[in-house]
Image (cartoon, coloured by chain):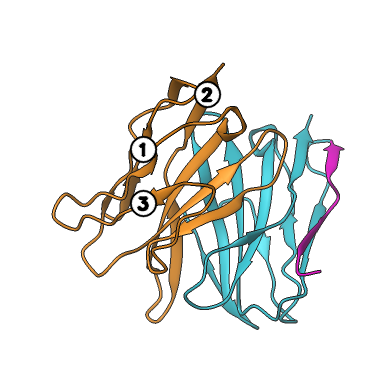
Chain colours: A orange, B cyan
Amino acid sequence: AQRVTQPEKLLSVFKGAPVELKCNYSYSGSPELFWYVQYSRQRLQLLLRHISRESIKGFTADLNKGETSFHLKKPFAQEEDSAMYYCALRSTGTTSGTYKYIFGTGTRLKVLA
Amino acid sequence: EAQVTQNPRYLITVTGKKLTVTCSQNMNHEYMSWYRQDPGLGLRQIYYSMNVEVTDKGDVPEGYKVSRKEKRNFPLILESPSPNQTSLYFCASSATGLGYTFGSGTRLTVV
């Protein structure tokens, strides 16, 4: 089954501490993975795509096919990083030639002063 | 400005009264989708559309309908809303290979 798992519902860290938000996936093909962020009372925004290997707002994520993981990391957390983070996988749809996105249940990051 | 526009932002309705939530994007994206967001359950896909007149069920399609007559619009229809459809709904669009652009959400309450 195609699935995205974010094992932590809540992660609290102190400002300046490193952050790692975990994401594991189950997918038989070649995955395309994304991280989205949702700040309080705002829409979801794309944070990272694994294809582009970019760093946004100091966050990075590396696809580890052996461990089927795509963890989101930041070396020094800031208070403004407090938000809900969702990992997502682009997978095949129910009809041939289609695709859909599967989201994890999200991790709420709280950065404490 | 490139965006996905949903209307209304807030809606309170009664059980059984048909409603439509509109979604429009100005980025010429082929792919559009509807999600509902519920506490502890994250985002669950309701329906998606690969292009005009091409739609498919997501994970929780029961009680919903969609149509894609034009590339820019992807309305979500609740023919007979029930209280368990009370939720926060998001529309999103994307171009092939890129991530989503999300709308600002519609908070629906069915009483």
Q: Which residue is mark 1?
A: A6
Cα–Cα span, label 2 and label 1: 16 Å
Q: Is residue B44 above or below residue B77?
A: above
Residue span colored magenta: B1-13
Residue B69 visible:
yes
Residue B61 visible:
no
Residue at the (58%, 72%) spot, across then down:
B49
Q: Which numbered mark, 2 or 1, is in the foreground of this view?
A: 2
Left or right of A48? Residue B87 is right
Residue at the (66%, 39%) spot, across then down:
B85
Q: Which numbered mark, 3 or 1, is in the foreground of this view?
A: 3
Question: Given contact means CB atoms under 8 Å apart, are the residues at marks 3 and 2 in contact?
Answer: no
Considering the whole magenta stretch, tell me its main secondary structure: strand
The stretch drawn in magenta includes residue B4 = yes
Relative image position of residue A23 (x, y in whole percent): 33, 43
Q: Which residue is mark 3?
A: A61
Amino acid at circle 2: Lys
Q: Earlier in the sequence, mark 3 or mark 2?
A: 3
Cα–Cα span, label 3 and label 1: 14 Å
Location of residue B47 (image quadrant): bottom right
Please tell me how crowded label 3 is: few (under 14), some (14-19), or many (20+) other residues with Cα within 10 Å: many
